[in-house]
Amino acid sequence: IRFAGDSGDGMQLTGDRFTSETATFGNDLSTLPNFPAEIRAPAGTLPGVSSFQLHFADHDILTPGDAPNVLVAMNPAALKANVGDLPRGAEIIVNTDEFTKRALQKVGYDSSPLEDGSLDGYRVHAVPLTTLTVEALKEFDLSRKEAERSKNMFALGLLSWMYHRPTEGTEKFLTSKFAKKPDIAKANIAAFRAGWNFGETTEDFAVSYEVAPAAQAFPAGTYRNISGNLALAYGLVTASVQADLPLFLGSYPITPASDILHELSKHKNFGVRTFQAEDEIAGIGAALGAAFGGSLAVTTTSGPGVALKSETIGLAVSLELPLLVVDIQRGGPSTGLPTKTEQADLLQAMYGRNGEAPVPVVAPKTPADCFDAALEAARIALTYRTPVFLLSDGYLANGSEPWRIPEQDELPDLRVQFASGPNHTLQDGTEVFWPYKRDPQTLARPWAVPGTPGLEHRIGGIEKQDGTGNISYDPANHDFMVRTRQAKVDGIDVPDVEVDDPHGA
């Protein structure tokens, strides 16, 4: 199902509510929100269309799909922007009140597609949504404009009837969302119920559909609907608790990564510190400083921000400190497509630094998998003392699916031992601390918290002498250090690929 309308029509809220009820009902689901980059795109235009797609089923589904069975189009622009994705025979629910001559001309329709036969291959339901909503809210003391705003709830009620969705959750949600404006809450609930009743009583919808819960698709457990950015934020908090380290986020707001900053700022009770820096470079610089100071350090960004952070990522490679670089990818190059998804930063993540600066890359496969990917990235960073890329993208970030909340004993132990004393004996018997003496298994160097007596050491961006960490311009030493840093990354313990195939391939 795809809900589409103006970016002020409440399509994201409508889709979100339908998703929540679908999750409560027990279906498997996958969503794809899609919205303009402008804060308020011009009304009634093609670039101003906002949509929310939801794929739900009684079995395991892995994608939000690209051919909706149902399109709810709130205006001509929404119809024109989305009709090309519909397979023949799909259902289109159209708000006929918006199909005025001016609105049609604005998007390049010479005649109304509702009358010229161009939609003959689809099952079109022409519904005057606005008129019906205003009529349903007559008893409320609302202006016409205020009443019209509830048309998305009328559409939600109609779709809820068509697909036998539960309704209690949405009514509860509206009551709490508009708790300070009870009249608006009651009006929205009335519009929602009117939409349901319209489906029940009109002759236009001969068929309603039942999609059973996906009982076989899920292992037993407690589930919630979760988006990728929320799962990733929870994964980072969990990693910091499991590592027994404070979490520090140094970040600069950028779509579609900003949600992680918003979410983590709510969790100070878990020892999380969020720092909104003045730019991308300051964000990662502060995070790397926090890593030096003994925190689980994270910086979040998107493609253009990674470009700015590349020098400091190279510094983290040289310092050999744990640092999570979270890249929620979007379309490029340059500013590109801020609100559209694309997976085009892989080569930048692998090679976008000067010199030889190998960095492991972890990529989640689904929105819920962002939680596990955050834990895995933290495990690698802490164990091997290296920056790690976590590559998500706009679809994973904003899309959602059911997530089984793990039991605490399923979570990995990520605790680390900080250096606490000298680790090397000189020929004359003096015990000293060498910051680049390596663990024979992982090749990780010791992590010494600044201020630990006797462990004073020098680190920086200039090439180090093996072991001592002194500045060295010796070519043989440089060759050795380059190969050692590469060997450290090459030696990372990576689990085998799990084949996920229904036919047992």
Image (spheres, grey):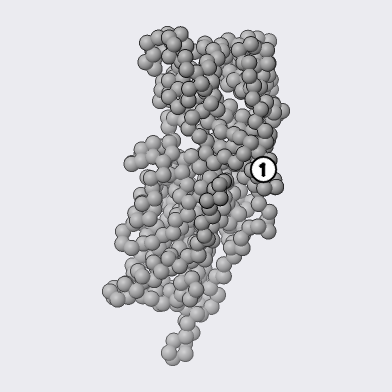
Residue 425 seen anywhere in this rendered image of the structure: yes
Residue 103, above or below 501: above
Q: Residue at x 52, y 12 (%)?
A: 96
Type of amino acid at the residue the image marks with label 1:
Gln
Residue 374 at x, y = what percent?
54, 53
Would you call the spot at circle 1 few (<14 residues within 10 Å), some (14-19), or many (20 or more)? few
Residue 70 at x, y = what percent?
54, 24
Q: Relative to 97, is 212 on the left or the right?
A: right
Residue 140 seen anywhere in this rendered image of the structure: no
Query: Is residue 138 or residue 420 the one in the foreground?
Result: 138
Q: Residue at x 66, y 27 (%)?
A: 210
Q: Relative to 195, is 380 on the left or the right?
A: left
Name the residue beneath numbered marker 1.
216
Residue 34 at x, y = what percent?
48, 32
Residue 158, above or below 412: above
* Farthest-out residue, bottom: 428
